[in-house]
Image: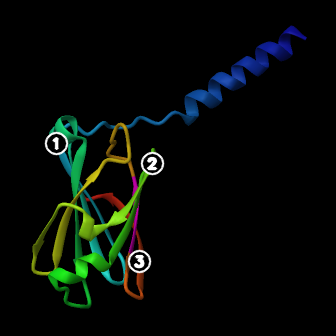
Amino acid sequence: MKLRVLFGILLIVIFTACSSKTQTVISDEVIFFGEGEYWKVSYIYNSGLYEEKKINWVEIETKVFELSQEEIDNIDIEFEGRDGLITGNVGDMETKIEGNVISFLVGTVNFVTYEEDEYKITINFKDKHDVIKLQIKR
């Protein structure tokens, strides 16, 4: 009986040691990037901006059509991370537009951001729907 208990404890220790991953906390600025059928997306994580205001920038760029200032009211997003989900209309957010690139502020969806994190953004614009996975741009 003692041997089984000891063996069980040993297995738990081995599985725990094997399953723990080392993650690298981001302490400066990095870009998570992804591309879909209609959009290119960058989530620019800046640790200083996050610490100060709990926000960061997202940039979306159209790939196949032109956008007017009025059309940003037709863009809805869902931004998902490990710890949460943010939804909203881009027209209701603080935005900057340069050509086909729209930048807008979002709160972060992770309490701590790691280089190994992945995000998912869903962009709905009129009849166009894109689900894009974002990973750190190296």
Label 2 SS: loop
Instruction: Depth check: give the residue in front, 4 or 96.
Output: 96
Residue that appears at 60% across and 28% down: 16
Question: Disc 3 marks which residue?
Answer: 130
Tell me where residue 97 appears, x and y as whole percent. 12, 73
Asked if residue 79 is positioned above or below residue 15 in the image, the reply reads: below
Counting the numbered discs, the total is: 3
Question: Disc 2 marks which residue?
Answer: 84
The reply to whether discs 1 and 3 touch (Cβ–Cβ < 8 Å) is: no
* Residue kind at label 1, given as amino acid type: Leu
Query: Could you tell which of marks 1 and 3 lies nearer the N-terminus?
Result: 1
Which numbered circle lies on residue 49?
Answer: 1
Residue that appears at 70% across and 19% down: 10
Instruction: Depth check: give the residue in front, 76 or 16.
Output: 76
The reply to whether discs 2 and 1 touch (Cβ–Cβ < 8 Å) is: no
Instruction: Depth check: give the residue in front, 64 or 9.
Output: 64
The residue range painted magenta reads 118-123
* Residue kind at label 2, given as amino acid type: Gly
Quadrant placement of the C terminus: bottom left
